[in-house]
Amino acid sequence: MKLIFYISFVLLFSVKPICGQQGRDKLELLRVNFINQNVELTSAEAEKFWPVYNEYNDKLKAVKRNLRQSYRKKPIELTEQEAEELYQLELQSRIAETELYKQYSEKIKAIIGVKKFVKLRVAEEKFKQEVIKTIKDREG
């Protein structure tokens, strides 16, 4: 099973560089397959899990995007007040991320159980490492 994933992963990255929405869609499909395989979600679990997991990720991305956009809008030379505002926004964003994690972790744990929840976190990290390794291998 892992061999199939690895082969599809290598083919995806070797055939066409990831760029634009199409590349993100392919990467998302690989991530979904990787998580499904590594967490061993049943059909019933997957049906309930993915909408909640995707909602969490969408909200998390929105918080992070808001912070990034705030940094981009500011000039390089900040006043003390502008720097303080960005600092406070960063703190608020981190708190919001933590609250989202806490809220959605409980929802996800209720759907798939604590053992699969831990497997999920391990699978997410493994997937990130595979992506980084594949990109480095392509560049080097």
Image: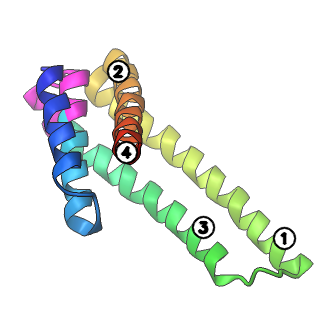
Position in image of residue 136 (x %, y %): 41, 42
Amino acid under disc 2: Lys
Amino acid under disc 3: Leu
Label 3 secondary element: helix
- Select label 2 or label 4 by which is in front: 4
How far separated are the C-alphas under marks 1 and 2? 39 Å
Which quarter of the figure has residue 131?
top left
Looking at the image, tell me whether mark 1 or mark 2 is earlier in sequence order: 1
Amino acid under disc 1: Glu
**Relative to 54, is 119 above or below?**
above
Dominant secondary structure, magenta: helix
Residue bearing the label numbered 1: 84
Q: Tell me the quarter of the image containing the N terminus.
A: top left
Per the rendered image, the range of residues in magenta is: 34-47
Label 2 secondary element: helix
Position in image of residue 59 (x %, y %): 42, 58
Give left or right: position of 43 versus 95.
Answer: left
Residue bearing the label numbered 3: 67
Any magenta on residue 73?
Answer: no
